[in-house]
Structure formats: structure tokens, C-alpha cells
């Protein structure tokens, strides 16, 4: 296992529900913090499963 190269900034968000003034509610998102990650490209393909198309990737 190699040391990860944390070069992608990700923003962690949480849903916020507020009244819309007409008896309902609106959902919006607010930033909770920042995380750093490494994203590596992988290969994959689409296959047909029992319920329809599904994504398959190699490990």
C-alpha cells in the first residue's frame, strides 16, 4: 500500500430543512467542512444483471 496523495478538496455538506411559508418545507445544503482525498482513475464496464444494467469494475 502506498501513501495517498491527498490532492482533491471535497466539501462535506449536510441537508437543511426550512419552512417555505406556504405550509411546506424546502431542503437546501450547507457546507460542514472540507476533506482532502486522492482520486485514482479505474477501469469499469456496464453489464446486464437480473434487474437491468449494472456497473462492474475490476479490483
Image (spheres, grey):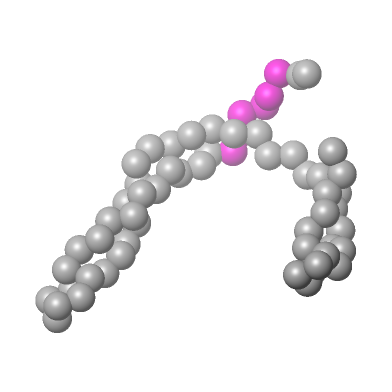
Q: Which residues are magenta?
A: 3-8
Residue 30 to residue 36: above or below: below
- 44 lies left or right of 19: right
Residue 54 part of the magenta-drawn span? no
Q: How many numbered discs?
A: 0
Residue 6 to residue 11: above or below: above
Residue 28 to residue 35: above or below: below
Closer-to-camera residue (3/27): 27
Residue 30 x/y as whole percent: 32, 51
Residue 49 x/y as whole percent: 83, 65
Residue 4 part of the magenta-drawn span? yes
- 39 lies left or right of 10: right
- Residue at figure coordinates x 20%, y 63% from the top left: 18
In the current view of this chain or complex, which residue is farthest to the bottom? 22
- 26 lies left or right of 29: left
Closer-to-camera residue (22/13): 22
Residue 14 to residue 49: above or below: above
- Residue at figure coordinates x 28%, y 56% from the top left: 16
Residue 13 x/y as whole percent: 39, 48
- Residue at figure coordinates x 87%, y 64% from the top left: 47
Residue 11 x/y as whole percent: 45, 44
Quarter of the image that includes the N terminus: top right
- Residue at figure coordinates x 84%, y 38% from the top left: 59
Image quarter of residue 20: bottom left
Amino acid at each position: 500500500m502506498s501513501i495517498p496523495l491527498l490532492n482533491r478538496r471535497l466539501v462535506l455538506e449536510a441537508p437543511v430543512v426550512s419552512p417555505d411559508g406556504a405550509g411546506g418545507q424546502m431542503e437546501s445544503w450547507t457546507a460542514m467542512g472540507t476533506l482532502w482525498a486522492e482520486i485514482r482513475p479505474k477501469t469499469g464496464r456496464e453489464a446486464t444483471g437480473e434487474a437491468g444494467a449494472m456497473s462492474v469494475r475490476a479490483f
